[in-house]
Image (cartoon, helix red, strand yellow):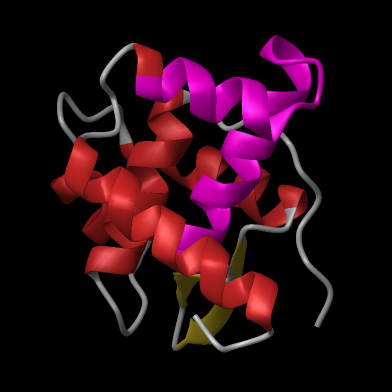
Amino acid sequence: MTSPPIEKLTRREREIMDALFALEDGASAEDVRQRLTDPPGYSAVRAMLVRLEAKGYVRHRVEGRTNVYSGIEQPSNVAAKAVRQIIDRLCDGSVEQLLVGMVDNEVIDKRDLASLARKIAKRKKGEAV
């Protein structure tokens, strides 16, 4: 299976993806709608699910007369792709620039930084992280 294209997700689309992953076995548009904060109407949720499917983030199966949707990508993969967009757009493609900014602004604390340093060292040695 190919990875979905890297397309920006709106706040509502991210919220829908979160709902789908919380409902692990798949969900109808109404199931998703019920999990949303300040939910729009059923038709709007259904349209967003169709759009997410077109973007490659969601798939559906038919059960009776109901479309049951599930996420294709795990949340961590979607997050990684979103971070890649940020790096490309705001940091001129530099992961180092992003990480230095996160350290300088104390987004990453000392414990997380030490853990990250250990993982980088293991990766350099060719060990599994």
- Tell me the quarter of the image containing the N terminus: bottom right
Examine the structure image and report whether residue 91 is included in the region drawn in magenta: yes
Instruction: Tell me where residue 14 appears, x and y as whole percent.
Output: 42, 39
In the rendered image, which quarter is residue 73 located in?
A: bottom right
Relative horizontal placement of residue 75, taking residue 97 as reference (left or right): left
Instruction: Tell me where residue 41 appears, x and y as whole percent.
Output: 31, 31
Q: In the picture shown, does residue 53 fall above or below 43? A: below
- Foreground pick, 111 / 80: 111
Residue drawn at 57 percent across, 32 percent down = 9
Instruction: Tell me where residue 98 appears, x and y as whole percent.
Output: 57, 24
For the question of whether residue 109 can be seen, the reply is: yes
Relative horizontal placement of residue 47, taking residue 113 as reference (left or right): right
Residue drawn at 58 percent across, 71 percent down = 72
- Foreground pick, 55 / 8: 8
Examine the structure image and report whether residue 102 is included in the region drawn in magenta: yes
Relative horizontal placement of residue 19, taking residue 57 as reference (left or right): left
Q: In the picture shown, does residue 129 fall above or below 93? A: below
Residue drawn at 70 percent across, 15 percent down = 91
| Span colored in magenta | 74-103
Magenta span: helix, strand or loop, mainly? helix
Q: In the picture shown, does residue 92 fall above or below 85? A: above
Instruction: Tell me where residue 65 appears, x and y as whole percent.
Output: 46, 78
Residue drawn at 58 percent across, 36 percent down = 83
For the question of whether residue 43 can be seen, the reply is: no
